[in-house]
């Protein structure tokens, strides 16, 4: 596995592979790999001859009071895991190489970024969209793979790729969970044992809500009220940031479930902010 930190060398290597006719895949990450990341890499390897993984804790997607400096980092472990997953190239740039001192260009998708996580993280998706466009321009891959855990992020990236005619196929992959249902996340490392023991209630609530819909509870307000009660008792240590039922593509609110909808939740639990979602079929 090659490890490259210089963006132009990364661009050259990706372009060499393209010229040789290889299919290529990019998996953007911030490192601290877990099975969720590794599942994306392994999937990428089934779809493309050459798999590139970027490992970059992107400063511009963290707000001033967020956890940029505390974000878990373990490059040696990540290198080893990526190699085992069959990755061909790990791109690990320094922030100065990705953002020149006079960097002035931002990519924004306001209609999709305003609600849900965008409410409490106002600069987050601008940072994500901008760095993903940089990475796609460097790698120009056949496909780029993202997790459905960050559903809003995936919706934004699909939209910007379409709107900007970026010739990369954007692929979403299912959420990988621990045995007790908690969606894997690098930020789960922030949880105390007591918080970790309670955290699976987040996904239990979503599955429970899906069952309520099946039993006929199809009005959004009723569903979300009932879910809020569930969390007040079973996730009592957490503070709910949002519970929303939205259109899976446009992320606009759904009042009544008549077509598939996305139920998305974010909670603060101790030092961690946890997100999860579930698709609700009709
Ligand atoms: P991150 O390193 O948190 O920026 O995540 C990098 C990629 O891995 C993103 O596309 C995430 O959506 C994806 N990802 C993170 N956690 C999971 C998970 N539990 N299951 C599937 N994909 C995930």
Image (tube, grey):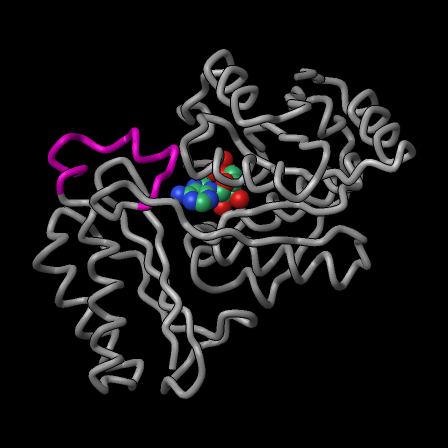
Q: Nearer the viewer, residue 85 or 276?
A: 85
Instruction: Give the image quarter of residue 4.
Output: top right
Q: Is residue 188 among the parts visible in the rendering?
A: yes
- Does 160 appear above or below 61? below
| Image mark count | 0
| Prevailing SS of the magenta stretch | helix
Instruction: Give coordinates of residue 70: x percent, y percent.
Output: 40, 24
Please state if 280 lies on the left or on the right of 247 as rendered: left
- Which residue shows up at 28% across the image and 52% down it? 267
- Does 17 appear above or below 63? above
Q: Is residue 62 among the parts visible in the rendering?
A: no
User: Quick check: is 184 in the magenta stretch?
Assistant: yes
Instruction: Give the image quarter of residue 132.
Output: top right
Instruction: Give coordinates of residue 94: x percent, y percent.
Output: 65, 19
- What is the magenta range? 183-197
Instruction: Give coordinates of residue 65: x percent, y percent.
Output: 41, 36
- Which residue shows up at 61% across the image and 43% down it? 127
User: Quick check: is 202 in the magenta stretch?
Assistant: no
- Which residue shows up at 25% across the image and 48% down it? 181
């Amino acid at each position: 596995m090659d490890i490259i930190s210089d963006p132009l060398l990364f661009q050259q290597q990706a372009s060499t592979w393209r010229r040789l006719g290889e299919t290529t895949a990019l998996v953007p990450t911030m490192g601290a790999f877990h099975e969720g990341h590794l599942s994306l890499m392994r999937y990428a390897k089934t779809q493309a001859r050459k798999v590139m993984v970027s490992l970059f804790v992107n400063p511009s997607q963290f707000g001033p009071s967020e956890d940029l400096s505390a974000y878990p980092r373990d490059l040696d472990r990540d290198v080893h895991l990526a190699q085992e997953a069959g990755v061909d190239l790990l791109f690990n740039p320094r922030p100065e190489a990705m953002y020149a001192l006079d960097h002035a260009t931002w990519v924004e998708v306001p209609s999709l970024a305003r609600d849900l996580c965008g409410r409490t993280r106002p600069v987050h998706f601008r940072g994500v969209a901008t760095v993903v466009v940089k990475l796609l321009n460097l790698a120009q891959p056949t496909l780029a793979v993202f997790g459905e855990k960050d559903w809003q992020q995936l919706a934004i990236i699909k939209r910007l790729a379409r709107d900007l005619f970026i010739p990369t196929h954007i692929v979403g992959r299912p959420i990988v969970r621990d045995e007790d249902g908690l969606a894997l996340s690098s930020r789960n490392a922030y949880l105390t044992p007591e918080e970790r023991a309670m955290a699976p209630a987040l996904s239990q609530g979503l599955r429970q809500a899906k069952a309520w819909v099946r039993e006929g509870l199809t009005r959004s307000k009723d569903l979300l009220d009932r879910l809020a009660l569930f969390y007040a008792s079973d996730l009592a240590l957490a503070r709910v940031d949002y519970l929303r039922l939205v259109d899976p593509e446009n992320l606009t609110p759904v009042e009544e479930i008549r077509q598939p909808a996305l139920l998305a939740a974010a909670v603060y639990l101790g030092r961690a902010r946890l997100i999860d979602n579930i698709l609700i079929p009709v």
